[in-house]
Amino acid sequence: MAKLELHNISKIYNQNNGAVKAITDVNLNINEGEFVCFVGPSGCGKTTLLNIIAGLEKPDSGEVILDGRVVSDTGPDRTMVFQEGALFPWLKVVENVEFGLKVAGVQKEKRRERAMHYLDMMQLTKFADSYTYQLSTGMKQRVAIARSLVMDPEVLLMDEPFAALDAQTRDLLLVELQLIWQRTRKTIIFVTHNISESVCLGDRVVVFTHRPARVKSEFKIDYRRPRLIEDTSLNIYARSILEELKGEVVAAIKEEYKEPDGKRDEQVLRDEN
């Protein structure tokens, strides 16, 4: 049985100019310990789907099933890492990491021990007593990941967590995240616009159509780990995904800008990735 099952998920937003379909009939199974990446055109509904899995939003139809039970709200079995770390600047790093444990009523010594364990895993032990404003953007994201892992979730949800990082920091974290995943064997769902990033990280890459999002295709990335984003052997996977995604990005651009032809399509597609 799959760890996570999405059955006929649909979502519609009512706006001033009428109803907007964000997601339509998404069906997807994710296995225990699998690292799955979602890619698709900007605004297609990937983050909305992630929020539904997290319980932050409710679908208009369909079900999310985790370990055989229907998900209807947020819970400690699913934690989210956002694009911005959303850390508390008035708390020290270790206090940020143990915050969820404190809310859950975990005894002080035990939560400190667990927090330090994950800070060590993220190579942040010596920054435990620093404040988050003293950290670089990359280090803040490490703190955010540690804060999510310390809750020992069944599923880790990541919404473009490396999008705001410089290329060098991102490439280092891509390797570190793979090593952490190999050690923890968490089920991870990772949303990204970057095809190379998805191929570097994922066991499987799920490609979504332009809005409303549907699952268009899936790619299994059968390649050794840890992977490096500059490894040219991964290009064959990236090219296949790019070809599959190209038409969806073009359609999204035409819909947004109402362009009669595809003169800007190639350039915008390159910008997206």
Image: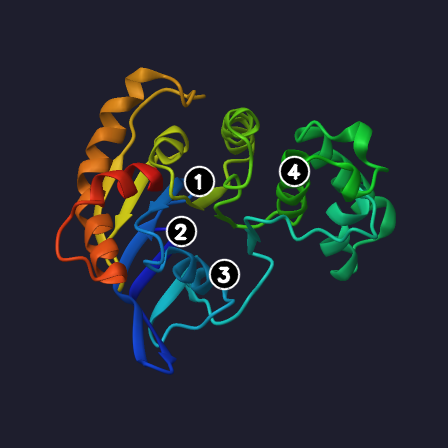
Q: Secondary structure at mark 3?
A: helix
At label 3, the amino acid type is: Ala
Q: Quarter-wise, where is residue 146 in the image?
A: top right
In-image side of 96 versus 158 (left or right): right
Give me the residue at 33% from left, 60% from top: 6
Type of amino acid at the residue the image marks with label 1: Gly
* First in residue order: circle 3 vs circle 2: 2
| In front: label 2 or label 4 | 4
Amino acid at dot 2: Lys
User: What is the number of the mark on residue 137?
Assistant: 4
> Nearer the N terminus, badge 2 or badge 4?
2
Q: Residues within 10 Å of mark 1 (few under 14, many from 20)?
A: some
| Nearer-N-terminus badge (1/3) | 1
Q: How many numbered markers are drawn?
A: 4
Query: In this figure, which residue is indicated by the disc labeled 2?
Result: 3
- Residue at (70% x, 27% y) in the render: 123
Within the image, what quadrant is residue 198 found in? top left
**Labelled pair 1, 3 in contact (Cβ < 8 Å):** no
Whether residue 1 is visible to the viewer of this picture, yes or no, is no
Q: Looking at the image, which is closer to me, 207 or 79?
A: 207
Query: Closer to the camera, 73 or 264?
Result: 264
Residue at horizontal 83 percent and vertical 50 percent from the top: 91
Counting from the top left corner in percent of width and height, residue 134 is at 79, 38
Circle 3 is placed at which residue position?
54
Q: Mark 3 or mark 4: which is in front?
A: 4
